[in-house]
Image (tube, helix red, strand yellow):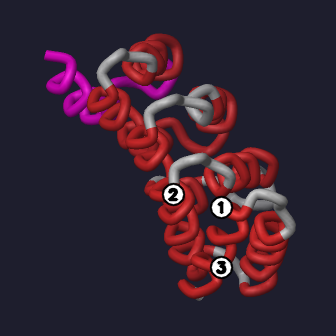
Amino acid sequence: MKLALVEAIVPFFRTVDKEKVMEGGLALLAGLLKDENHSIRIGAMQRVIEASEVIGAEGTAKQLIPLVEGCLGDKKWRFKFAIAQSIPSFFKTLPYDDHKDFLDKVLTSFFKDHNFAVREQTGKSLVACRTLLSQERYNELIQKHVLQLAGEVNYIYRVAACAFLRQL
């Protein structure tokens, strides 16, 4: 039943007024992001990106970014992996200069995740953002995050930096 709700929520958002979505619809989405079933949470996270298209950049900044930030510390690696897969969509929807703190927080959190699949997907997603950013911004992000990983004491983060550099 909840999976059907997850599938139908954004099409429903498209049929109602944007203000109504922001008043009550996003609370429903927030509840789905906290569900005990990680499949429900993964589906809800995918709908967050779609919902951002409905409510626009301002609504996304006020409503959806806090929802996503609340999910960064989730214990299930598959859920964090789904968020990492969404990184290009975040960059596409949210201008980097306006949402730099949030986007950097997502990258930093997932590049330093204990699960290799999450770290690897974060690297792949950042590579996919190459066409979404200016060359200068992209290089700035690469330098910031890869140098940070490469300077870590724990070798798993240095390995992540090497793996990321191979993808470039």
Task: State which tag comes first along the sequence, 3 or 1.
Answer: 1
- Under mark 2, the amino acid is Phe
* In the displayed structure image, the side of residue 30 where residue 46 appears, left or right: left
Task: Kindly identify which numbered label has been placed on residue 162.
Answer: 3
The picture places residue 23, in percent across and down from the top left corner, at 52, 13
Identify the residue at image location x=79%, y=71%. 150
Compared across the picture, whether 97 is left or right of 18 comes to right
Look at the picture and state if 152 lies above or below 33.
Answer: below
Q: Name the residue at 55% across, 42% down.
A: 56
**Residue 117 drawn above or below residue 7:** below
Three-letter amino acid code at the position of disc 1: Ile
Quarter of the figure with the N terminus: top left
Kindly identify which residue carries mark 2: 116
Q: Is residue 164 above or below residue 28?
A: below
Residue type marked 3: Cys
Residue 16 covered by magenta stretch: yes
Q: Which residue is mark 1?
A: 156
Residue 112, horizontal then vertical, whole percent: 68, 52
* Quadrant of res 168: bottom right
Asked if the magenta segment contains residue 23, the reply would be no
Density class for disc 2 (Cα within 10 Å; few <14, some 14-19, many ≥20) is: some
Asked which secondary structure carries label 2, the reply is helix
Q: Are marks 1 and 2 in contact (CB under 8 Å)?
A: yes
Closer to viewer: mark 1 or mark 2: 1
The magenta-colored residue range is 1-20
Secondary structure category for the residue under label 3:
helix
Give the CA separation, mark 3 to mark 1: 10 Å
